[in-house]
Each structure stands twice: as C-alpha cells, then as structure tokens.
Image (spheres, rainbow, N blue to C red):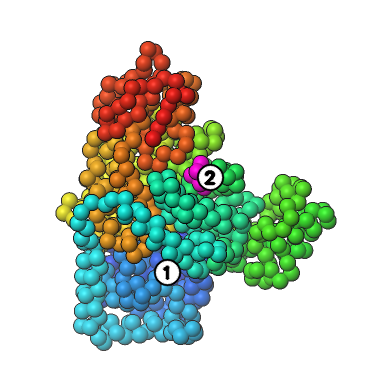
Amino acid sequence: MNRLAEETSPYLLQHAENPVEWFPWGPEALEQARSDDRPILLSIGYSACHWCHVMAHESFEDPDTAELMNRLFVNIKVDREERPDLDAVYMNAVVSMTGQGGWPMTVFLTPEGKPFYGGTYYPPTPRFNMPSFQQVLVAVADAYREKRDDVMAAAGRLTDALDGSSRLGPAEGEPDEEVLRAAVRRIASVFDEQWAGFGNAPKFPPASAIEFLLQAHHRFGDADALRMAAETLDAMALGGMYDVLGGGFARYSVDRQWLVPHFEKMLYDNALLAAAYLHGWVVTGQARHRQVVEETLDYLLTEMLLPEGVFASAQDADTDGHEGLTYVWTPDQLRDALPAADAAAAIAYYGVSDTGNFEGGTTVLRPSGPEPENLSGIREALLRTRASRPQPARDDKAITAWNAFAISALSEAGWRLDRADYLNAARTCAGFILERMAVGGENPRLLRSYRAGEARVDAFLDDWGGLVNALLDLHAATGEARWLDEAVRFADRAVELFADPEAGGFFYSSREGEQLVARHKDLDDNPTPSGQSLMAMAALRLSRITGRGEELAAGVIRLGLPYIAGSAHAFGELLRVIDMYVSPPVEVVIAGDPSNPATGRLAAAARSGFHPTAVYAFTREGDDLPLLEGKGEVGGRPAVYVCERFACRAPVTDPELVAVP
C-alpha cells in the first residue's frame, strides 16, 4: 500500500497497491520534493480512462519501472475529475510543449510545481516513434541533475506563459446578432454532411453546439441550423455510441459514423445530451427524440443513482480488462439468449455478424434491418442476459457540476414529460448537495466531490455556475421558493470568490483556494460547458430577476468573442449566453401557490413551447426581489405576468390566454 490508500477517489484507490510510492497532490509531496531535491512526476487520469488502465498495467504495476520512479522522482497521482484545476494548468503546459494532450497525462515538475517536460501515454518499450517510459524517466532525471540551469529556465518561461494565458484581454464593443449568424455559418463549415456531427473521427457528442443551433433556428428561422441539430441528434441515437438496450451514451465514437464507441459512460454527457434531446423533441416534435430523453434519464436513475440521491461520475470503458466486453455480441450469444425466431430477427435487426465491427469479431448493436414484431421482448431478454455478464466498474464519487447538469435535465424533463419521478430525483439531488456538499450560511463554501460519506476539495467555477443554473431550473419546474433563494445566495458568493474585476470574467479556481503556479480561465464548452459560460448564464438569468449582474455576463462575452470565430462549435454554451444577452428580456412571473392545480395549469401554459431566453420565477410571501415585488394573484386567482425589463403586461388568469414571446 502507498499513500493513496487513504484517499476516497476510485481512480486513486485503483493505484493504492502499485509498487510506485505515490503521493496524492498536497503539501507533503511538494515538501518531499524540495527536501530531496528531486523532480516531481505528476500523473493525471481518471477511473473510466482506458489508456490510463493500460499504462497502469504496463508501467505502474511493473517493479522495475516503479523502482526507477521511486529512486528518481517524487511521484504524485491526481484524479482529473476531483482536481480539474491541476489538470487544466498542466494540460495547457503539455499542449504547449507537444502540440497535443490527453490522458493519461505525464508531466515532470520542479519541486516548486513548475512544469518543464511532459506528454501523455508512454509505452513500456519503444514503439510508434515513441521512447519507452523507462527511457523517458532516465533522460528527464539526467537533464534535471546535469542541466539544471536549462531545466529551470525552461520551467520559468513555460510558467510565465501559462500565467499570461489566463489574463485574457476583452474584446472591444458589444456583441450583436451578426455574431450568432456568423457562428452558424462557421459551424456549417465543419458539419459532416454524410454522418452528421462536426469534424472527423473521433467524434464527441456536441451537446452545447446542438443547443445553440436549436436556439439559432428559434431566433432566425434558420432551417440549416435546425437540420444540423436534428441530423446530429438522429445520427447519435441510431446505436453504437448510444446504448439501444439500456439507454445512455458512451463517451465518444472512434469513427465518423457514431458506430464504434469508446465505451465509458459519463454522467455529464448523459445529462447534457438528455437536455439537448428534450429540446430537440420540443422543436421538432419527433417522438424518437423524446424516447432517447426518457431512456437516458431512466438509465441515470437505474445505473448511476447512488443511495444518497446523487449520481455517480462514470461507468468504466473496460470490463475485466477488456473494453466493451459487457455490451458487444456475437450471433451465437444472441442465439443463446433468445428463442430461435427472435434470435434470427435480432441478428438481422441489429446487424450482428460473425466478423463484427469490434474486437474479437463482436458487434456493437445498431438497428439497421427490419424491426422485429417482438422488439420489446427481445430487448428485455437481451438486457437480462447482459445483466448476468460481468459489469464495468462504476466511479461512485459524486461531482457537484455534473450532478447539477443532471438536476437541470431532470427538472425540465419532469414538467415537460409529466414525470414526477424525475422531479423528485432532482429535488433529492439538489437537497443533498446543499446539505452535505455545502457549508456555511451567508458565505457558503461549496465542495466538489463526495464519496463514502466524505465531501472534499473546494468547488470550482463550473460547480458553482452549474449549481446556480440547476437551482433556477428546479425553481422553474416546481415553483418552490427554496431553490430560487439558494440560487441567489450561491451566485452572490461565487462572484466574490471567482470574479476578475480587472479583465472581466471569472477565474476557474477560488481566490480562497489553493494557489497553483498559474491561475486558469476556462472558455471552451467541450466536452462540458465552461465555468465561464455557466456563470455568465447564471448571472444573466438572475439579472432578469434581481436587476443586477448583467455586466458580469457581458464581461465573459467580451473575453470569449475573439475565440468564437475560429471554432464556433466549441463555444456552444457561450453562444447561447450571447443569444440571451442580445435578446429582448422575457421575464415570466407566476403568482400563486405552486401546489394549487390552477397555478400548475398556468405554469404549464407559460412554459410550453420553446422559449430558450425566457426566465421564470414564482412569487412567494414577502417578496423583495425586483421582478417579483408587488405581483400577486388577481381576484383570488393565480396569474401570469409577462414582462420586459420589469415592465409587465396586464396579468392573465386564463391558461388559454397566456402568450410568452
């Protein structure tokens, strides 16, 4: 056992019995490096990462490699999901040095934490024009010992560059509709007209870009924007990357066709995609989009929900050391699982062949033939068989930001699809985060990660921004005052902790948290919305209720504008913020007891349809928020007020007369 045995992260615990003398990141490791005058070997990965497991088996479990590591370095292992701040800073360094990044990430640091060399996966023997990991270890240690001045100078230059990159300069002027139109054109230029999605293999699910395209269609009536969004939703749901038996999406597709997945399933992908498919269904009316929403959220409730009511982070790509073993099929396996007639129909329907499309001649299920009459029975039988197989490991730590995405999806799907179980799950999850992952009253402290009864690691910008948006979504779905009050409280505290009053926008880590060699600002919205975009959206939504905070969103927009033109599809959430910022404000107040069915009917009428830039709030006793003040029932009947910058039309009490722009 090494020092990782006392950690709670499943990824770190996977390495607790390595012969490598791992430290977790912290003062003890840094002090050890200083006192021994040894460089630091920093290894960053996550539990569902296939190549992280490969490098662990090849190198970290090898006694000879471990002996070299222990003799030459102070070795630190980090879970990137717990410490995205470390991951971001040192990933930027690796990309600067090598032109590419990924996981596992291997970075060599001075005892002060300054990077001077790094890469990603290193093989145990030289191959693919790559040196072996042992060769890298010896060369780096020799350079640190024999060319110290050169190493320290390189580390200083790289650290200065990293610190400078966090001080992004804001653009001049204000955004307008042309920014949005140009973004649609830019996204169209990288759209895959044959298989949908953006770019070539590998393909990642572009939830935020899809959401923006749906909004662009709503704003401009842009048929091409809707086509790109709908075709991408349809292509991803055909199977392969989408689990057509059990619901839920794999992390990405290794090919252009969305067929062969990298099998890990992440909470954030599934929560964000559930919301994207929900909005796709609202806009297109296609029943298949609604089906994906319900199957995906049901998957989360079945496979990812922890006993405490929060959601686990991921399911592993590997089962018993083999990627995708749980999910793939051969014709003989289908014949063993089904009656003969059903097996023949399933083989034809799912395109299962002896050659397969994955390792060992196995097939990833993808409906491509005639639909069997007994499809539901076939699915149930195959799910039972699959459940009897060895299952992938689950990373059962709960991440605040990712759970916030799930709360948002469950909240909106709950009222749109009339699913009380979704709303109850959202309530329970939000309540747990507020009660067990946050401490303090007027000045709350939020924590990022929870596992095994312990919440730890100060939360980052995406945790705070995601939570505020989730609380606003839960308030809009239920009308319950608690969630709005908490959204205001946490948003105010986030501004204190993260805002940059000089350059605008927000830093990724709190001013009260650990200060690394550089302070990072995140902007791009892949694979998840950036902390900047989430906080900007939260500030903008709350400004329509409280009358303050719009300038914070404007600061983020100005930081991001210079980057959108070059890669618009990577800034989907920021483009949604811009869409809301340049839109005439739409504020909808629902006055009445949320438990009153008459209030519920009015709320349903006000929320129906697609109103992506509207803000919803329910009144309550003693309201002092500017939007809600002075608004109440009319003649003892619940009422809806539709407002623009707090100037409201006459209240409406008849659901059939409610009209939201």
Q: Is residue 9 left or right of residue 511?
A: right
The residues tagged by marks 2 and 1 sit, at their Cα atoms, a distance apart of 36 Å
Position of 53 relative to 437 (above/below) = below
Residue range in magenta is 277-283
Dominant secondary-structure state across the stretch colored magenta? helix
Position of 137 relative to 320 (above/below) = below
Q: Is residue 109 visible?
A: no
Helix, strand or loop at label 2? It is: helix
Name the mark on residue 284. Answer: 2
Q: Is 227 or 77 nearer to us in this picture?
A: 227
**Residue positioned 26% across, 87% down in the render:** 146
Point out residue 111 in the picture as x, y percentages from the top left corner.
26, 71
Name the mark on residue 102. Answer: 1
Label 1 neighbour load within 10 Å: few <14, some 14-19, many 20+ = some
Specify which label sits upstream in the sequence, 2 or 1: 1
Q: Is 199 or 262 nearer to us in this picture?
A: 199
Point out residue 225 in the picture as x, y percentages from the top left corner.
45, 53
Helix, strand or loop at label 1? It is: loop
> Type of residue at label 1?
Gly
